[in-house]
Image (cartoon, rainbow, N blue to C red):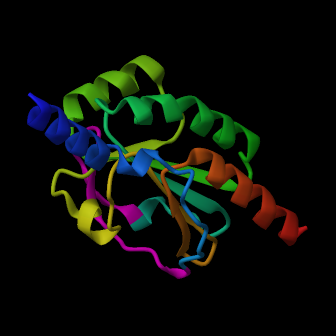
Amino acid sequence: MRTIKHLLGICFLTICSACSSSSEKYEPIYTASVDLSLQTTAGEEVQLSDYLKPDKYTLVEFWRGKCSYCIKAYKPVVELAAQYVDELNVVGVIVNDFDSSLDFIRANKPTWAQLMDPYQQSVQAYKLKGVPTFVLINKKGEQFLKTSDIKKVARYLEQDLALED
C-alpha cells in the first residue's frame, strides 16, 4: 500500500510539475517562435504563424479541457486580454482532450482564437513539460517568456510595455 501511495505521489508531481511556478526563474528566451501545423476547431488546417500579429505581443496558451489548472487560468487570461486589448493577441492551442476542450469553448466563448494540435507537435517544438504553459512572443516574433504562471505573464507584460512608453 505504501508503494502505491509513493508511486501515485510521483505521478501527481510529474503531471503537475508545470503548475508549481513559485520556483520558476525568469530567463528571457529570445528565440524565434516555432511554427506549427494546427487545425481550427472546425478542422481547417492552419499555421500558428497565421495568428501572430507583428504589431502586438502574442500569448500562446497551451492547454487541455480536462486540466483543472488550465480551467483555473481561464479567467486571468480573459482579464489580461481585456486589459491589453490593443497590445496583446491571445491564441489558445489545445494539446489533447479535444472533446472536453471544445465543450469548454462552447460554454465559455473565449474571444481569442482556439486551435488544436492533433499531431502533438507543440509538446516537442515548445518543450512543454505540462499544461497550462504560456509562451509570450514579442513583436519581432521571438519567444521571450515560457511559464506555467499566468501572473508572471502579467508582470512581464506590464514591465515590457512600461519600457516602450
Q: Quadrant of the C terminus?
A: bottom right
Relative to residue 104, is residue 72 drawn left or right?
Answer: right
Instruction: Confirm whether the magenta stretch covers residue 44.
Output: yes
Q: Nearer the viewer, residue 148 or 35?
A: 148
Q: Is residue 67 above or below residue 152?
A: above
User: Which of the pair 80/11 is nearer the observer?
Assistant: 11
Nearer to me, 80 or 156:
156
x%, y% of residue 118?
17, 50
From this view, report whether residue 127 is shown above or below residue 99: below
* Residue at x 15% of width, y 41% of height: 7
Residue 110 in sight here = no
* Side (left or right) of 7 relative to 157: left
Residue visible at 22% across and 35% down?
A: 98
Q: Dividing the picture into quarters, in which one does residue 4 lie?
A: top left
Q: Vertically, is 19 above or below 141? A: above
In-image side of 14 versus 19 (left or right): left
Farthest bottom residue in view:
31
Residue at the extreme top: 107
Check residue 67 for magenta coloring.
Answer: no
Q: How far across and how far down the image is residue 97, in percent? A: 21, 35
Q: For the point 58% across and 29% down, which residue is it?
A: 75
The image position of residue 151, as x and y in percent, is 64, 46
To which quarter of the image does residue 114 belong? top left
Q: Which residue is pictured at 13% across the width and 32% down the height? A: 2
Residue 43, placed above or below residue 120: above
Q: Which residues are magenta?
A: 30-48
Q: Nearer the viewer, residue 143 or 140?
A: 143
Q: Is residue 77 visible?
A: yes
On-image quarter of the N terminus: top left
